[in-house]
Amino acid sequence: MLKIIFAVLSIVSMFIGYDCSKEKSFTITEAWARATPSDPTPEAAYFVIHNHTDADDALVSLITPAAESAELYANVEKNGVWELGPTGPYVIAAGKDLTLRPGGVYVVLKGLKQPLNEGDTFPLTITFNKAGKVEQDVLVKKAGSVSFQKN
């Protein structure tokens, strides 16, 4: 009887076709933001995106319950002048990483619903065009922090 059950389950699993590759297609590491004052102003979030696939994919949206909106911003040079502004969708090359950091590409959190306090975390949903959604907790570090590692 056990052999029959195993055989049936084996056949069923072939037709269900679970795609394990999506689970680890993108990983997020070193996700952090700075603590804010009691009257929060827009703040930024930073992290590293690792594309483990063999195809380019685009980051198309960001959502967090901690803020009214989360937008990808970048410092870019236009005609010899550095400008700050929204960007997107942002393509992460196959097998490469994208580091979101102060002064480069980063997430702007607008309309914070409450202050970000050192040591807290908040969820961030990062959506890619092909890979779909990746959920990540963002660690709130000390105000004035300059990187995930250093305060």
Image (cartoon, helix red, strand yellow):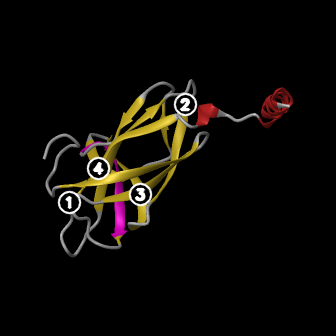
Earlier in the chain: of badge 1 and badge 3, it is: 1
Residue 15 shown left or right of residue 25 in the figure: right
Name the residue: 38% across, 52% down.
137
Residue occupied by mark 3? 123
Dot in front, 4 or 1:
1
**Residue 54 placed where, x, y %?**
56, 24
**Residue type highlighted by circle 2:** Asp
Residue occupied by mark 1? 118
Earlier in the chain: of badge 3 and badge 2, it is: 2
Residue occupied by mark 4? 32
Earlier in the chain: of badge 1 and badge 2, it is: 2
Q: Secondary structure at mark 2?
A: loop
Q: CA distance from mark 3 to mark 2?
A: 25 Å
**Residue 68 placed where, x, y %?**
42, 69
**Residue type highlighted by circle 3:** Pro
Residue occupied by mark 2? 56
Q: CA distance from mark 4 to mark 2?
A: 25 Å
Q: Secondary structure at mark 1?
A: loop
The numbered dot on residue 76 is: none
Q: How many marks?
A: 4
Magenta region, residue range: 103-111
Please say whether residue 14 is one of the residues in the magenta stretch: no
Contact between labelled residues 2 and 1, with CB atoms less than 8 Å apart: no
Contact between labelled residues 2 and 3, with CB atoms less than 8 Å apart: no
Could you tell me what secondary structure mostly forms the magenta stretch? Answer: strand
Q: CA distance from mark 4 to mark 1?
A: 10 Å
Q: Secondary structure at mark 3?
A: strand
